[in-house]
Each structure stands twice: as structure tokens, then as C-alpha cells.
Image: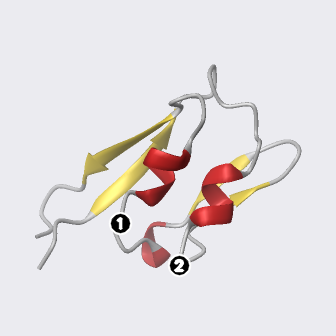
């Protein structure tokens, strides 16, 4: 089983473009004009959003106690 991660956003870098939400296959990220939301229960730990972010505002953090 792959490790479980959570996505952390650097709010100083993120300009809410929605690129991460647009590529997320499990709809674990929602971006509106005023905020960025991550839904841990939907995340499949693929890290596609981290790669897709044009400004490097996302980071994957391993969730402790999960494997």
C-alpha cells in the first residue's frame, strides 16, 4: 500500500489559479476566488497536484501512522 499524504499549500506563493484542482483525479482540492481547500478523505496520494502547480506552492507531507 502506498503511503498516505496530505497536501500543504504555501499561501504566500499560491495565487488560486486552480491548476491543482483541475488535475486532481479524486477531486480532493477545491479552489475558489478566495480560498484553497484540501479534502484528506478524498486524496489518493498521487501527487499530481504538486507536479502541476506552476509556482511550486504545494508540498506533499506524509501523514503519520498511515502506510
How far across and how far down the image is residue 24, in percent?
Answer: 56, 67
Residue identified by numbered label 1: 46
Residue at image point 30% right, 58% down: 5
Q: Earlier in the sequence, mark 2 or mark 1?
A: 2
Number of marks = 2
Q: Distance between the residues labelled 2 and 1?
A: 9 Å
How far across and how far down the image is residue 45, in percent?
Answer: 33, 66
Instruction: Please tell me whether mark 2 sits on a helix, a strand or a loop.
Output: loop
Residue 22 placement: quadrant: bottom right
Q: Which of 1 and 65 is in front in this view?
A: 1
Instruction: Please tell me whether mark 1 sits on a helix, a strand or a loop.
Output: loop
How far across and how far down the image is residue 32, in percent?
Answer: 83, 52
Residue 53 placement: quadrant: top right
Callout 1: few (<14), some (14-19), or many (20+) C-alpha neighbours within 10 Å?
Answer: some
Q: In which quarter of the image is the N terminus?
A: bottom left
Residue at image point 44% right, 46% down: 51
Q: Residue 25 carries which label?
A: none
Callout 2: few (<14), some (14-19), or many (20+) C-alpha neighbours within 10 Å?
Answer: some
Residue identified by numbered label 2: 26
Question: Is the residue 8 above or below the residue 19 in the image?
Answer: above
How far across and how far down the image is residue 67, in percent?
Answer: 10, 70
Q: Are marks 2 and 1 in contact (CB under 8 Å)?
A: yes
Q: Residue furthest right?
A: 33
Amino acid at each position: 500500500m502506498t503511503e498516505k499524504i496530505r497536501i500543504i499549500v504555501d499561501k504566500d506563493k499560491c495565487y488560486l489559479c486552480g491548476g491543482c484542482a483541475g488535475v486532481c483525479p479524486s477531486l480532493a482540492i477545491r479552489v475558489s476566488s478566495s480560498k484553497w481547500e484540501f479534502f484528506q478523505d478524498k486524496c489518493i496520494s498521487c501527487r499530481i497536484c504538486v507536479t502541476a502547480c506552476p509556482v511550486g506552492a504545494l508540498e506533499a507531507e506524509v501523514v503519520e501512522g498511515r502506510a
